[in-house]
Amino acid sequence: MYITEPFALPDNIEKPRFYSPLAETSPSASGNLPHWEQTGKTVFVTFRLADSLPQEKLSEWLALESEWIIRNPRPWNFETQCQHDELISAEMERWLDNGYGDCILRDAMARTAVENAITHFDGVRYRLYAYVVMPNHVHACFMPLNGFRISQILHTWKSYSANAVNKVLNRTGNVWQKEYFDRYIRDELHFERVIRYIRRNNTALAWIAASV
């Protein structure tokens, strides 16, 4: 479900549950990035195509992250992880918006394949509040349900959509970068900010689609 009025959810839609500093938070790993999981809490994720950044930009980003880690050595608590995400993943998103790579998700069939993967288990494994498929990356805001973990949901989305995208584009090879970026939603204000950001990207995407 993509909500058109993000701040007035229907009564039959699960309301977002936000990160609690009092609840148990467990670490998990995906590639080289640390992740924290708190069961059943609303999250904002970004995942990108395998070719979405040129090597020089990737090297620049890795240097930025390395400098930050030197100043903030691991292990991190959740608050430090949030500070990391605000700086590092925001910088990554800024570069992604520049449209590096082949941007295969401009193709309508490829984009639909990704949308189908994201919406398939809405209401069963997660409550999907908003998402947008950009030319070289995806944003989604959702809340895991029934004990499913963020890492499981992302693995399903990426695995299913990669096969579908390769099929409709008659191509082979990696589609997605292994890593993903996630930020837990802290409160109602944070939730509104994220939904507004996704909606702005939807407007931008409509303009891109009309111009190619």
Image (cartoon, rainbow, N blue to C red):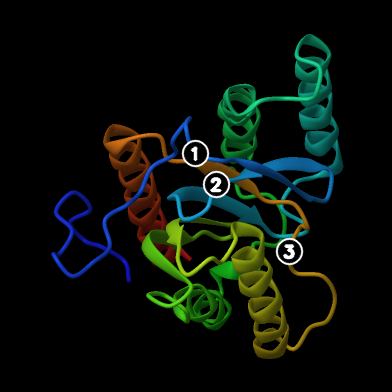
Q: Which residue lies furthest to the top in this view?
A: 71
Give how far across and how far down residue 133 sits, in percent. 50, 63
Q: Is 172 placed above or below 92 here? A: below
For the residues labelled 3 and 2, say whether their Cβ atoms are less than 8 Å apart.
Answer: no
Report the quarter where the N terminus lies. bottom left
| Foreground disc of the pair 1, 2 | 1
Work out how far the residue at label 1 is from the one at label 2, CA to CA, in angstroms.
Answer: 7 Å
Residue drawn at x 39%, y 52% is: 204
Q: Do the residues bearing badges 1 and 3 touch, measured as CB atoms within 8 Å?
A: no
Q: Residues within 10 Å of mark 3 (few under 14, many from 20)?
A: some
On residue 176, which mark appears? 3
Which amino acid, mark 3?
A: Trp
Asked if one can make out residue 136 in the rendered structure from this viewpoint, the answer is no
**SS category of the residue bearing label 2:** loop
The residue wearing badge 1 is 23
Tell me which residue sits at (66%, 55%) in the image.
Answer: 48
Q: Quadrant of residue 181?
A: top right
In 3D space, how far apart are the residues under numbered discs 1 and 3 (Cα atoms)? 32 Å
Against 206, is 165 above or below?
below
For this view, does 121 lie left or right of residue 32? Answer: left
In-image side of 173 versus 26 (left or right): right
**Residue 199, which numbered label?**
none
Residue under the image location 84 percent in, 13 percent down: 70
Q: Residues within 10 Å of mark 2 (few under 14, many from 20)?
A: many
In the picture, the disc for residue 38 is 2
Q: What residue type is labelled 1?
A: Ala
Of label 1 and label 3, which has the lower sequence position?
Answer: 1
Contact between marks 1 and 2 (CB within 8 A): the answer is: yes
Q: Is mark 1 on a helix, strand or loop?
A: loop
